[in-house]
Amino acid sequence: MNWDLADKKIILIGGPGGVGKTTLAAALGVSLGLRGYRTLVLTVDPARRLAQALGFKDFENSVKKVTAPEYPELQLTASMLDSEHYFDKVIERFARSPEQKKKILENRLYRTMVESLGGSHEYAAMERLLEFVSSDEYDKIIVDTPPTQNALDLLQAPQRLANFMDTSVLKWFQKKGGLVLFQRGTQMAMKALQSILGSEFLDNLAAVLGDLEGMQAGFRSRHLAVMELFRNPSSAFVLVTQASEARFLESVEFHKTLQNEKIALERLVLNRLEPDFQSQSPTGLEKEALTWFSALQKHFEELRLVQQKWAEAFQSAIKVPMIRIERKATLMSDIHALKELGDELIN
Amino acid sequence: MKSSYSEEILSKKVVFFTGKGGVGKSAIASATALLAQRHGKPAILVSWNPFDQQARPLPYQALGIPHLLLNGMDCFREYALQILKFEKVVDLVLDNKVVNTFISAAPGLTEAIIAGKIWDLAGKNPDAVVLVDLPASGHALSFFSSPLGLRKLFRMGLVHREIERICEMMLSPSTLIQLLSIPEELSVTETLELKKKLLSLGEFNFSPLFLNQCLPNFPGTPPQKEMAESTLSGNAKELYNHYTTLLEQESDAVAVLGQAGLEIRKLPRLSCPEWITTVEAISEALEHS
């Protein structure tokens, strides 16, 4: 079955960590970039080998045209985001003044704070995406989303940052002793909280939150923009996962979240399925080697059967077209290998 | 002589399991619980999801492992009750929207509360080992860094003492961090990064890293490479090539980890049909680690 991507501009590759999203995103990018589309792959923290395959010497925070001598027609750009710079990007985007930016970037506490909200990592990826979408330079944008156990982590990152800076909370902290701003119930609650945490903590936090003031409106509008983008018919969400019980339970939850958020799932990709070798007992091996080889055969056959069982469970639980990708016995270290994989995904 | 994994675990009060997503944290933590139980030591498995969302419902109960899913708000409620004494007052405080936003937003507060709860559990169950299934690397790091960061915010008072207690226990010799990885470049890189960052925070105690999903040791003797290449054909040859590629990846991973000075323990990839049987088989393998 062919996967028709003609009407799709944005392809979001999501799923749990460690299932091979980054490689699949790059592969799809190469494949589409060879079909006449101006393609962009947006990736986060790629493996060194993959970065090299795409022509990156190191983990760079940059946008780069991918070239391959054997494929002069390739129209592919890759953008790699170094996770170390996530936070800086977020702050740069929304700081209201150079002073505010400087103050925030120099204080480790803010970083810890935003990181602990689980926002900046996911947030910066979405931020980058919105930048490229508005530029109109590309026909296809493939987004390798940061690994999230739950789809919500990704979708709600900007919202969470905005909530964190909620104006009503800020107001209280900015006016020391400004309890009067609240209704009676809240006043009492905050006083009780003060007795739990101590006034020193609240004062410190007040200073921190005061520095971040004015940034929340930006986060909120970005959240809306991201949600709109995800729900747009020209966007396709692809869930990449593997055929095992733990991954199955996780993916079903993931799918449920997407449904609740009214985001359509375009494809389910079961990655790294063990190939069916159907190998016969080989001739010409001596006894010890034959014992070893039979055990090898048995092991991989068992792995395959277990995966097959969970693949069936996936099929009946998540009713979208499923793509099965076999585990490759080659390392994804050149454009050609990526093209083959990408073609497998599309065809 | 190097001590075995079971010896190590049996002498600890708290063990944290962390690594990149998909490396088998929950399975190995559960298998460790079974291992401890088998050696007569009660084990309590604790998991924590930083966003308080429904965790995947893994069948811990069927394995007979006491399991606690920690939730930041519930733990804060417990902590607040110790101080405010009256349920009604606590309800008044925590049901308030402003306070609620504040608690979930305050830097590292949830992490510190969760850590506090873990030490309470360890304190109340002095004979048991508390096994903590931490979220993937990034959040695990903030779990360890938050209390150390909060130290700067609280210089005195009740919370200060609580934070001091948490920091002390994190670095205590009876606390262990168990790093996990699989023989794949991304996972190995992330684990090395995590260890480096953790070491920059403090002198944590690490157990040798578990390299999970390695190729099993098959009975018999593998054929010589030249022999295999000349003798095998068709699908059998493909299977053999598949194996050698995986083996190559595995030796790369071992080499990289070795260069970084990490001790490792290998665990085989298992072909059990269900999560429960996988955990039982890992637990068996841990017995010999």
Image (cartoon, rainbow, N blue to C red):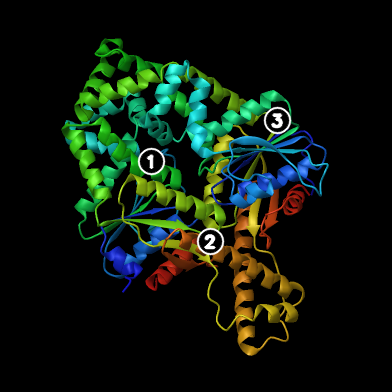
Q: Residue at x 52, y 31 (%)?
A: A123
Amino acid type, callout 1? Ser
Neighbour tally class for label 2: few under 14, some 14-19, many 20 plus, Cα within 10 Å: many
Amino acid type, callout 2? Ala
Q: Nearer the viewer, residue B61 or B78?
A: B78
Q: Residue at x 39, y 70 (%)?
A: B289
Q: Quadrant of residue A125?
A: top right
Instruction: Check residue B253 in the rendering and tell me which mark sits there, or answer none.
Output: 2
Using the rendered image, report if marks 3 and 2 lie on a common chain: no
Instruction: Check residue B142 in the rendering and tell me which mark sits there, or answer none.
Output: 1
* Residue carrying label 3: A233
Alpha-carbon distance for marks 2 and 1?
Answer: 26 Å
Task: Note whether residue B62 is visible.
Answer: no
Report whether A90 appears left or right of B110: right
> Which is more N-terminal, label 1 or label 2?
1
Q: Nearer the viewer, residue A281 or A309?
A: A281
Report whether A38 appears left or right of A94: right
